Image: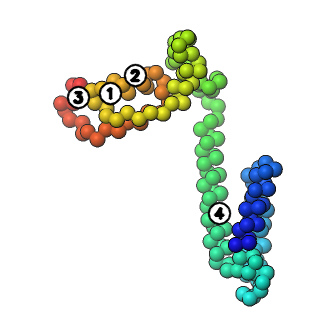
Amino acid sequence: MMLFLIAILIWLIGMRRKITFWRSYAPLIGLWMVSLAISLILPETSQIRLFFGGDPRVLIIFGGLAALATLYWFALSVIRRRATEKGPDAMVGPFAKFELARYSRHILLREIGGAGQARLKAAKLLVIGAGGLGSPALMYLAAAGVGTIGVIDDDVVEDSNLAR
């Protein structure tokens, strides 16, 4: 338990000093390695071994879980970085170039403007039913530039639905 509190203290000091992610992990990895070595070398009745965690199996499982969490975080950061890399649709302010071309008339309108279009882009909404009313509503919401639109409709498409 004391080892866990020491690890939290090290992590909090790293966050307080705004140390980078990898530099804040180095002391934690060192603490884990020392405690694992102590728990493997010293006899079970040693007070130092009990202070540093006692059972090496628990430390190995904890280290494995921490390594998996770190790999997951690293993979997510790589995906985020690739998603935000500048490409042919480079961002110009809050909008990509193609969005400026698509929504230029909305942005020019005094009632909507750039701030309003940015709010539409950030909006998230859910439409329940994609039938006679929901379908055109979805079309107009998408054309207006709403950022995220969810659709819930449990109906099954039949031949008679296609004419509508």
Asked if one can make out residue 68 in the rendered structure from this viewpoint, the answer is yes
> Residue under circle 2?
140
How far is mark 4 from mark 3, CA to CA?
53 Å
Marker count (numbered): 4
Q: Are marks 2 and 3 in contact (CB under 8 Å)?
A: no
Q: Are marks 2 and 1 in contact (CB under 8 Å)?
A: no
The quadrant holding residue 138 is: top left
Q: Nearer the viewer, mark 4 or mark 3?
A: 4
Where residue 106 appears, as percent x and y from the top left, is 52, 15
Position of the N terminus by quadrant: bottom right
Circle number at residue 162: 3
**Mark 3 or mark 4, which is nearer the start of the sequence?**
4
Q: Residue at x 19, y 32 (%)?
A: 159
> Residue under circle 1?
135
**Label 3 is placed on what type of residue?**
Leu
**Label 1 is placed on what type of residue?**
Ser
